């Protein structure tokens, strides 16, 4: 996608034409005025100063032509000053307008790091962004529909959501403008499963180390996407059907589950979150069961899982039994309300999530 670009070549050619015309007129003016009685235009510096005085409408009157044709050239300078001003002001306005347009389209790039990149924009993507921004994550959205830009910028602050107007397959621009290699995960949010699969195969050729997530209309394609290199695949129909069935026979559990899946906006709403255990964290080198009781007592937080890195893979232990020690670099998965979330943020000194 190309934004409106300033016509630099046209400006350069116009400037050269103006310079050539004025250079010729100055040369003629000097030949007419040089050596004439009472003339003060006897050197190239004199006629240049006269040109500047005339074009800027300063009119000091210290240098004036005395010959008839010299005055005619001065008359040309005087009238043309209006056109020169118009040209200069027009180019400045065009330049400023272009800068604003490029910034709005994301062509100046972003400095986001460890952020989420969303390829494609629709109502579902808008809902996802709402939860990500609520959780304090920065998001970069790539869209090839110019009409989406104003909508996204209206809903979200620039420091939270960056938008790039670009073709999805312009991988060089994606790398430079949205810091794609520095993203924590890429959400491929295209229209259908086939388009998503083709895009995953193409983008993996350029960025094979990134984590990718897709939502599928056809849950049977999960294994296909996993073999293509997708890190996480979510079947929207599968999640909806499970939640619907749960509402039918255990509505209270379903209601609580739906709340847990979303970001807790209010203090009395619950959410499941994971926090990184740093080296100086009080729960580092602590038995899991001790941390379980301490977190419940001190923060009203329920510890439900422990995540460890083993051979480069993440291993989730759901409420593990037996003796397990929490090491620095592990993640604790906890269920909490809004009050507990704020307290844990200060305790762990780290944003939630990976």
Image (cartoon, rainbow, N blue to C red):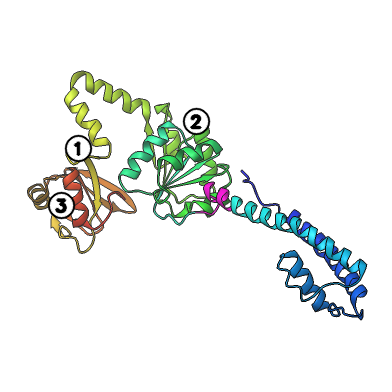
In this rendering, the answer to whether 68 lies above or below 236 is: below
> Where residue 12 appears, x then y in whole percent?
75, 59
Residue 229 visible from this viewpoint: no
Earlier in the chain: of badge 2 and badge 1, it is: 2
Residue at image x 50%, y 43%? 142
Circle nearer the viewer, 3 or 1? 1
The boundaries of the magenta stretch are 99-109
Residue 192 visible from this viewpoint: yes
Q: What is the CA distance from the residue labelled 3 to the residue labelled 2?
A: 44 Å
Mark 1 crowdedness (10 Å alpha carbons): few <14, some 14-19, many ≥20: some
Q: Is residue 102 magenta?
A: yes
> Where residue 158 appears, x then y in whole percent?
43, 49
Q: What is the CA distance from the residue labelled 2 to the residue labelled 1?
A: 33 Å
Residue at image x 37%, y 37%? 128
- Does residue 229 appear to the left or right of 304 in the view shown? right
Q: According to the image, label 3 marks what residue?
A: 324
Q: How many numbered marks appear?
A: 3
Q: According to the image, label 1 marks what residue?
A: 269
Q: According to the image, label 2 marks what residue?
A: 191
Nearest to the observer: residue 70 or residue 246:
70
Q: Please tell me in which quadrant of the rendered image residue 146 appears.
A: top right
Nearest to the observer: residue 83 or residue 141:
83
């Amino acid at each position: 996608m190309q934004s409106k670009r300033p016509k630099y070549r046209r400006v350069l050619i116009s400037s050269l034409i103006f310079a050539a015309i004025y250079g010729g007129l100055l040369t003629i003016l000097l030949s007419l005025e040089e050596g004439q009685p009472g003339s003060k235009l006897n050197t190239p510096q004199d006629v240049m100063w006269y040109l500047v005085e005339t074009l800027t409408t300063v009119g000091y009157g210290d240098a004036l032509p005395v010959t008839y044709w010299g005055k005619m050239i001065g008359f040309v300078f005087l009238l043309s000053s209006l056109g020169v001003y118009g040209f200069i002001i027009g180019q400045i306005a065009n330049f400023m307008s272009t800068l604003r347009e490029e910034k709005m389209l994301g062509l100046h790039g972003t400095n986001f790091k460890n952020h989420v990149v969303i390829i494609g924009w629709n109502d579902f993507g808008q809902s996802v962004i709402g939860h990500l921004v609520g959780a304090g994550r920065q998001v970069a959205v790539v869209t090839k529909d110019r009409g989406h830009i104003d909508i996204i910028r209206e809903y979200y602050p620039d420091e939270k959501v960056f938008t790039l107007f670009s073709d999805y397959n312009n991988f060089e621009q994606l790398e430079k403008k949205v810091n794609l290699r520095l993203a924590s995960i890429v959400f491929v949010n295209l229209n259908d499963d086939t388009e998503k699969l083709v895009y995953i195969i193409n983008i993996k050729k350029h960025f094979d180390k990134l984590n990718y997530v897709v939502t599928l209309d056809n849950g049977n394609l999960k294994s296909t996407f996993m073999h293509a290199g997708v890190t996480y695949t979510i079947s929207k129909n599968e999640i909806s059907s499970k939640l619907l069935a749960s509402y039918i026979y255990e509505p209270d559990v379903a209601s609580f589950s739906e709340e847990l899946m979303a970001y807790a906006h209010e203090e009395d709403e619950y959410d499941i979150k994971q926090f990184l255990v740093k080296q100086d964290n009080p729960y580092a080198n602590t038995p899991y069961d001790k941390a379980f009781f301490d977190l419940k007592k001190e923060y009203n937080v329920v510890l439900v899982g422990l995540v460890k890195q083993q051979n480069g893979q993440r291993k989730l232990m759901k409420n593990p039994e037996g003796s397990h020690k929490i090491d620095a670099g592990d993640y604790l998965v906890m269920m909490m309300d809004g009050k507990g979330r704020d307290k844990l943020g200060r305790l762990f000194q780290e944003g939630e999530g990976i």
